[in-house]
């Protein structure tokens, strides 16, 4: 009878959650970001880190490349939820 070697379980420390929102829609011309129609804003999703959000942002932006008024953005939700983190 053979037994499997015992392994010690190690707890990995989860990385700090840095939420990011990907949002997009048609914007009005000009330097300020003003959506043309808030009912048509595309709330793509919330992602656990910037890399994941940026990958989705890039995909959505490429899908709408033919529409010059369509813009997608990555919003740093973690900065809005915990503004004291930016001051450290």
Image (cartoon, grey):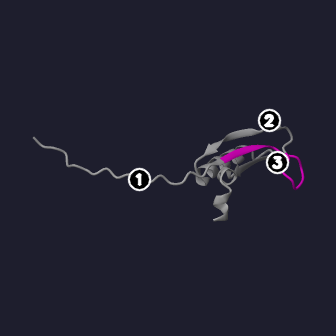
- Name the foreground residue: 87 vs 41: 87
| Residue at mark 3 | 68
In the rendered image, the residue lying farthest to the left is: 1
Mark 2 secondary-structure assignment: helix
Q: Which residues are magenta?
A: 21-34
Q: CA distance from mark 1 to mark 3?
A: 45 Å
Q: Position of residue 13 (x, y in %)?
A: 44, 54
Q: CA distance from mark 1 to mark 2?
A: 41 Å
In the rendered image, the residue lying farthest to the top is: 39
Tell which tag, 3 or 2, sits nearer the viewer: 2
Q: Residues within 10 Å of mark 3 (few under 14, many from 20)?
A: few
| Residue at mark 2 | 40
First in sequence: mark 1 vs mark 2: 1
First in sequence: mark 3 vs mark 2: 2
| Residue at mark 1 | 12
Q: Is residue 84 left or right of residue 35?
A: left
Q: Residues within 10 Å of mark 2 (few under 14, many from 20)?
A: few
């Amino acid at each position: 009878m053979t037994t499997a070697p015992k392994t010690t379980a190690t707890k990995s420390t989860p990385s700090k959650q840095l939420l990011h929102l990907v949002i997009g829609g048609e914007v009005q011309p000009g330097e300020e970001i003003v959506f043309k129609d808030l009912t048509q804003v595309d709330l793509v999703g919330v992602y656990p880190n910037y890399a994941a959000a940026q990958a989705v942002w890039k995909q959505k932006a490429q899908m709408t490349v033919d529409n010059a008024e369509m813009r997608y953005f990555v919003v740093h939700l973690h900065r809005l939820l915990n503004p004291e983190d930016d001051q450290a």
